[in-house]
Image (tube, rainbow, N blue to C red):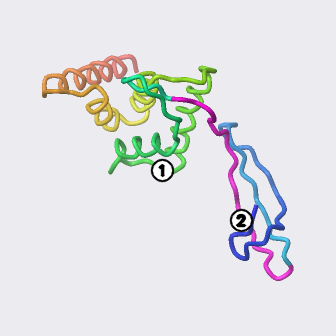
Amino acid sequence: MHCPICSSKSTRVVDSRLATDGMSVRRRRECERDRCGYRFSTAEEVELLDISIVKRDGHREAYLRDKLVSGLKKALEKRPYTDAQFQNLVQKIERDIQKRRSGELTSLELGETLIKHLKRFDKVAYIRFASVYYSFEDLKMFETELNKLIKKRRRTSKKS
């Protein structure tokens, strides 16, 4: 790991800690160059490799985390969440993908995984994403999905 200040290749790990979710490691590093000594943190997490997404038309493309993050950020635009909460959401989605133990995933399976997690994370973002994903063609379809959420909320609040 290069020092971000002096670009020295000589850095050492001072401390390592497992994140609360157990899926990433945070490391404190220190530059070993005499006059620098800069301390910085790095994060190490599981990376999804060699997963292909099978699109609706049958063509395949590599899984790209950036594409997932971009879609989630569009759905969550102007919604209240922290960076840590967002990273946790992405990790949960990727963990679900990994649990499948398959080198291929259809875009429909990926979309359903995102829908499931967004529904728990933020209801407004869920509706935004669902309206695009399910291609709501009119207000009636949108209203039907909203009513499902309202009914579920009422059932949950009655149990409390």
Query: Which residues make up the magenta segment?
Result: 34-52
Identify the residue at image location x=59%, y=30%. 95
Quadrant placement of the C terminus: top left
Q: Is residue 155 above or below residue 142?
A: above
Q: Indicate the secondary structure of the residue bearing disc 1.
A: loop
Q: Which image quadrant is residue 45 in?
A: top right
Circles 1, 2 touching at the beta carbon (< 8 Å) = no
| Count of number-bearing discs | 2
Q: Indicate the secondary structure of the residue bearing disc 2.
A: strand
- Amino acid type indicated by mark 1: Thr
Residue 98 place in picture, x, y as percent: 61, 27
Q: Is residue 114 above or below residue 77?
A: above
Residue 141 place in picture, x, y as percent: 18, 22
- In the picture provided, is 129 more to the left or to the right than 10? left
- In the picture provided, is 127 more to the left or to the right than 28? left
Identify the residue at image location x=24%, y=28%. 135
Indicate yes or no whether the magenta region holds residue 96: no
Mark drawn on residue 72: none
Mark 1 — residue? 82
